[in-house]
Image (tube, rainbow, N blue to C red):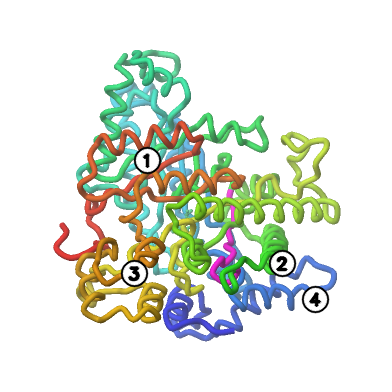
Amino acid sequence: MQLSANGQKVFDARYAGKDENGQINETFPQAVHRLATTASIVEQDQHYWTTKFTDVIGNLLFVPSTPIWANVGKTDRPWQPGACFVLAVEDSLHSMYDVLHQTAMIFKSGGGTGYNFSSIRPKGDLVHSTKGQASGVVELIRLYNASANMVMQGGVRRGASLGILNIDHPEIKDFINAKLNGDLTNFNLSVGVIDAFMDALNQGAAWELKFNGKVYETIAATELWDMLIWAAHACGDPGIIFLDQIQRANPVPGKVMNATNPCGEQPLYPGESCLLGSVNLAKMVKAGAVDWDLLRDTVSLAVKFLDNLIDVAEYPLPLVDQNTKSTRKIGLGFTGLADALIMANLAYDSPEGRSFAGELTRFIQQTAHETSRELAEEKGCFPDWENSIYYPHEKRRNAACITIAPTGSVTAMAGCEGYGVEPIFAVAYTKQTKVAGDFEVFSPLFLEACQRRGVTADVLTEVAQRGTCQGVTGIPRDIQQIFKGAQDIAPRDHIKMQVAVQKNTDNAVSKTINLPNSATVNDIDKSYRLAYQLGLKGITVFRDGCKEGVITVGEGKP
Ligand code: ADP
């Protein structure tokens, strides 16, 4: 039970128990034990399950997500395990500030929140009680953004949020352009797009912006779309969520799902939350082949672990407690897909690589569903089961099981190179830090492969300067094929990987579609349309250097 040096840093900074002076007083094995015993509280044979959970988490086969490590089982309460929340804001000052308060409570306990703001009246509308003018959606987002700055999460990170506005809201143009000036840094923005809009776009038809049945403006669908892709090209926001696609996969269709958590991987009902965990795929490949038995056992234990935590959880709000327990959604996913692909000698952007990823996800999903069925037999179905698509033939303990999260912190703790479903960022890159200045980082897997093949130091220097090994003389062909960073992979191939994994994912997939700095607005256009055609639930693009980047590939980039 040991962490890498980097892993230990993440653990110490974010997850380890601390005393009143902020001094660390918990080791990694102690924290594993804390999680394992807490998740076993609801079991009859607590000793047996504690041993099982300790084994699977301690060996980093299964890695629960940040709020679980940071909160669950600690003497400091609450034991809040959820990373993902969605809240509904109504069109009243009372609701706006109520939800702001709820959000603060969620941030404090380590979660992120998504909102669909479409029920808020647009800027300039009449406020009946005061006869003044409504300040509108974008102004409300500014308020929430400022609040997120204030509420530091566990003193470590600021709260992340996702604001969604539907494509027919009268304030949609301001929303689309809201991040162009570099503001709203705590918010991701996504436009809620429906099939009818895509039809209008494809037919070159007009599109109405309306609120409460009143049409405010009629605009060519193409004009609105152009605005959207132009802004996404300029600053990475907004992304899109495809609302009808999300609704088609809704396990309890009577409840509307019109928003996701901040990184887009978890569509939820208003007031619902979800807890996450990842299978470490780097540990599932042995001598180039997947150890399916190990994967099955890991997934099965992970599902039971996450499901048990729903019962011991202390949610920040009664509303969230009730909604979360009525569906019992869990979000099991993975990290280290890129590592697994490299170990299996498969290129991320090859048909074989995609089918490998798809097969792994299918197996994880199938196993998770089997376990959820068994748990339903043993402990009962989720309370909303009778209103769900599973009723009456298929028992389930959880309305949904699979979510592919960004795994921003747990990947480093697990010692993987690839985050979530992402390829390795780059085989070498310059990291810009405020504290330590700029320095070069190599992918350890890449270095190892190069050393095995006798690649010389000056060739590696060239790779570091370019930020890629593609086309570098002295790097063997097969290494070039396997070791592609996010920027070496065509946007289309990023999307195809997202599709391969989404097919077997109950919830959604958090994925960044990387584009080179030279990508055009037309490239964004193609990516967003392709995402819709291929049935994705959402898409986010990132053009290198379009935001004040933390990491830049190669030297001399903006
Ligand atoms: P981790 O690796 O820390 O477990 P992820 O990077 O996979 O977490 O993120 C999963 C989800 O956790 C996000 O989609 C979001 O809902 C929540 N989350 C992550 N970072 C933040 C943050 N800074 N503030 C609030 N919520 C966050």
Residue 279 is a magenta residue: yes
Say whether marks 3 and 1 touch (CB < 8 Å).
no
Question: Which numbered mark, 4 or 2, is in the foreground of this view?
Answer: 2
Say whether marks 4 and 3 touch (CB < 8 Å).
no
Answer yes or no: is residue 105 visible.
no
What crowding class fits label 1: few (fewer than 14 Cα within 10 Å), some (14-19), or many (20 or more)? many
User: Where does label 3 land, which residue?
Assistant: 476
Up/down of 558 relative to 255, above or below: below
Alpha carbon distance from label 4 to label 1: 45 Å
Given residues 32 and 278, the one toward you in this image is 278
Given residues 437 and 428, the one toward you in this image is 428
Answer yes or no: is residue 353 visible.
yes
Q: Earlier in the sequence, mark 4 or mark 1?
A: 4
Alpha carbon distance from label 3 to label 2: 34 Å
Q: Earlier in the sequence, mark 3 or mark 2?
A: 2
Which residue: 51% across, 48% down? Answer: 509
Left or right: where 522 falls relative to 104: left
User: Where does label 4 land, which residue?
Assistant: 48
User: Where does label 1 land, which residue?
Assistant: 239
- Amino acid bearing label 4: Tyr
- Amino acid bearing label 1: Gly
Alpha carbon distance from label 3 to label 1: 37 Å
Say whether marks 4 and 1 touch (CB < 8 Å).
no
Q: Earlier in the sequence, mark 3 or mark 1?
A: 1
**Badge 2 residue CB within 8 Å of ligand 1:** no
Q: Quadrant of residue 481?
A: bottom left
The segment highlighted magenta reads 273-284
Alpha carbon distance from label 4 to label 3: 50 Å
Say whether marks 4 and 2 touch (CB < 8 Å).
no
Q: Earlier in the sequence, mark 4 or mark 3?
A: 4
